[in-house]
Amino acid sequence: MKIVVIGMLDEREDGLSLLKSRIEQRGHDPILIDITIGTGAIAPSLKAHITNEEVAKAGGTTIGEIREVLTRERDRATSMMADGLARKVLECYKSGRLDGIIAVGGMTGTFLSLTAMKALPFGVPKVLISSTVAMPAYARRLSEYLGLRDITVMNTVVDTVGLNPLVRRLMINGAGAICGMVEGIEPIKKETRPSVALTEFGFCDQCAHYVREGLEKLNCNPISFHATGLGDRAAEDLVGQGLLDAFIDLVPASLGEHILGGNRDAGPNRLEAAVSQAIPYILTPCGFDMLSCGPIERRDKDDPLWVSRKLADRKLLLQDAMRVQARTTAEEMSQVARVVAEKLNKHREKSLVKFLIPTRGFSSLSGEGAVLYDPEADRAFVDELRKRLDPEIRIVEIEVHINTPEFARAVVEALEDSLRRQAEQK
C-alpha cells in the first residue's frame, strides 16, 4: 500500500525519517512530500519523493516566490503552498499512488496538511500528528477542516522538532495508526438500501425520531446530521460526493442563518448539493422560524448589546447566556423563501423535490402557545415560496405540528414517492 507522508524537512527531518522507516518496515511504500516554506538554510539529508519546489509549481508559483511573500503576508504564502499541496495529493490519489496519508506539523504544517486532506474523499485513511490542534485560538478555523472530513488527529502535547523519546513514541504510534488503517481498509460498498441524509436539531427532535423509524421500515439507511451549521455543511459535503442517495432536510435553517446573520450559518452553498446531484430532496421549513443570535453580549457593528437592543421588539427564547433564539419576521421569512425557491428551481428532476409545510408549527418553539408563535410570519414564508417555486416542485401543507407522527409519516411517504419516480426515470 502507498502512504503519503507530509512534513517540513527543514524542521522535522528526524521524526519524518523515523515515520518513513516504520512504514517501510510494515511492508508499505511511503511517498514523502516536503512542504518546507522557510529560508531553506538547513539542507536536509533525507530526500523527498516530491520536493517543495514541485509542490509550489503545482500551485502555479515557485518556492522562491512563496518565500518572498512569506516575509510580508504569511497567510497568503501558506495559501499558495496549500493549493499546490492539495493538487499534488489529489494527483497521487487519482493515479493510484495514495492509499492513506499522514502528516506531521506545527501550526503552518497543520493547516497546509489539512487543506490537502480536505481534498480527499470520505473513507481515505487520514492521520494528522499536530502540536496545535488543541489550541483554543485556532478551534474555529480547525473546525472548517475537522468538521467536514474523517481526519484522525493525534495531539502531540509536545512540539515534534527533533527526536527525543516522546517524539519518537509519537512517530511510532503514528506509523502504526496509518499502517493499521490502510491494512484494514475496505471500499465503501454500494448497498441495496438507499442511504438518506437527515438534518435535525432539538426543536424538531420528535419528528426526527419518527422519521428515522419510518425510514427503517422503508428499508433505508438514515444518516443523521446535527443542523448547527457545521453538521449540515458536512451533510452537503457528503451528498455532494455522491455518497448518499437522498436528502431529507428537516432543518434547512442554516441557509436562513446565512442570509440573516445567525450563529448556525453554514455558508452560501446550503441547499445546493442535492440539487446538483439531482437526487430526491424532501424539505421542511423547520428553523426558518428562528434566528440563533446569542450570546447576550454579542457585538455587532460596535453595538455592545446586540441582542437586547437590536432584537428588543422581537419574541426571544433565552435558553442560557450563550443561546438566544429570536423570532424571524414576516419580511425575513419572505426573504428566505425567495432564496430557497431560487436554489430548488435549479434541480434537474423537479418531481423528486417536495417541500412539506406543518401549518401548526414549524418547530417546537413556534406552535400555538409557544414562545415564538407567529402564524402570520409563517404564512408569509409559505405564500412567498408558492409564488417563487417552480410548479413542478410540490408544496404540501399538512394541518399538524412538525413534531407529530402524522407529519413524519408524510415526510417518509414523500421520500418514498420521489424514490419511486427516480426509479421509473432510469
Image (cartoon, rainbow, N blue to C red):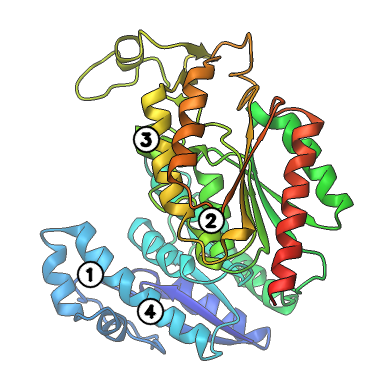
Q: Earlier in the sequence, mark 4 or mark 2?
A: 4
Q: Separation of disc 2 and disc 3 at Cα?
A: 22 Å
**Looking at the image, is 175 positioned above or below residue 314?**
below
- Quadrant in the picture for residue 161: bottom left
Report the mark closest to the observer, 3 or 1.
Answer: 3
Q: Separation of disc 1 and disc 4 at Cα?
A: 21 Å
Element type where label 1 sits in the image: loop
Q: Which residue is mark 4?
A: 87
In the image: residue 280, left or right of residue 64: right
Q: Separation of disc 3 and disc 1 at Cα?
A: 49 Å
Report the mark closest to the observer, 3 or 4.
Answer: 3
- Which x, y percent locates residue 383? 48, 33
Residue 236: mark in rendering: 2
How many numbered callouts? 4
- Which x, y percent locates residue 333? 43, 30
Q: Separation of disc 4 and disc 2 at Cα?
A: 22 Å
- Which x, y percent locates residue 377? 47, 22
